[in-house]
Image (spheres, helix red, strand yellow):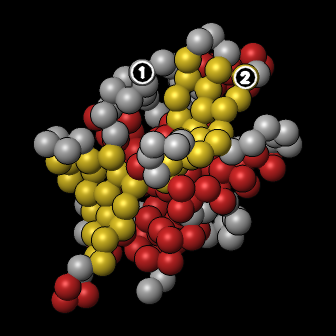
Amino acid sequence: MAYILGFWFADGCIYGGRLFDITVHKKDKYILKKIADEFEYEGKVTDYTNRQACRINFSCKVMYDDLVSLGGTERKSNTISFPNVPKEYLPDFIRGYFDGDGCIMRLKNNRVNSAFTSGSRKFLESLLEILKEEAGVVGGSFDDSCCSLKFGKKDTFRIGEYMYANNSDFYLKRKKEKFYQ
């Protein structure tokens, strides 16, 4: 559930007093199906006809209230704070957030960088502190022009080791593979 919460914090939306959804690129539709299975969701994953995206919609007052109690709000992008996630679930939450709003780039000359994006600098500042404490990250720099927190090669691999240490089967394959190429 921590992974799903992290993924929702990145790519989710909440609206209408009890509705919420998660939207991803069509190539990542399988992760929405895994989330649907986890919730025993009987609806379908919907494809947008005019975009290369798909989504899953929920209408459940209990789950909506849980999201709100964990910091979810309408138009959350610029206002979210890092939620209170128990320490043992932080890697899962961060991996979920990374799968939604993170990237790893393999560049020329064996250079590797990674980044997390958010409209909320406060969220990114909290994330950096947690990664320093829990994953042994020593760097990290903010790029306010694109609302991101960037890392160099050594820290990127520390983050990858931290996020994937528990061998969970909730992750985006294309992102995990970049850590191990």
Q: Is residue 90 visible?
A: no
- The structure residue drawn at horizontal position 28% and vertical position 50%, both measured from the top left corner, is 149
Q: Is residue 119 visible?
A: yes
Mark 1 or 2, nearer chain start: 2
- The structure residue drawn at horizontal position 59% and vertical position 41%, both measured from the top left corner, is 55
Q: Which residue is mark 1?
A: 75
**Residue 173 pos. (x, y %):** 57, 70
- What element does badge 2 sit on? strand
**Residue 72 pos. (x, y %):** 54, 24
Looking at the rendered image, the quarter that the N terminus falls into is: top right
User: Which quadrant of the view contains residue 44?
Assistant: top right
Tell me the mark number nearer the camera, choosing from 1 and 2.
2
- On screen, residue 124 above or below 68: below
User: Which quadrant of the view contains residue 91?
Assistant: bottom right
The kind of residue on which mark 2 rests is Ser
- The structure residue drawn at horizontal position 55% and vertical position 23%, both measured from the top left corner, is 14
**Residue 47 pos. (x, y %):** 59, 45
**Residue 137 pos. (x, y %):** 36, 62
Q: Which residue is mark 2?
A: 59
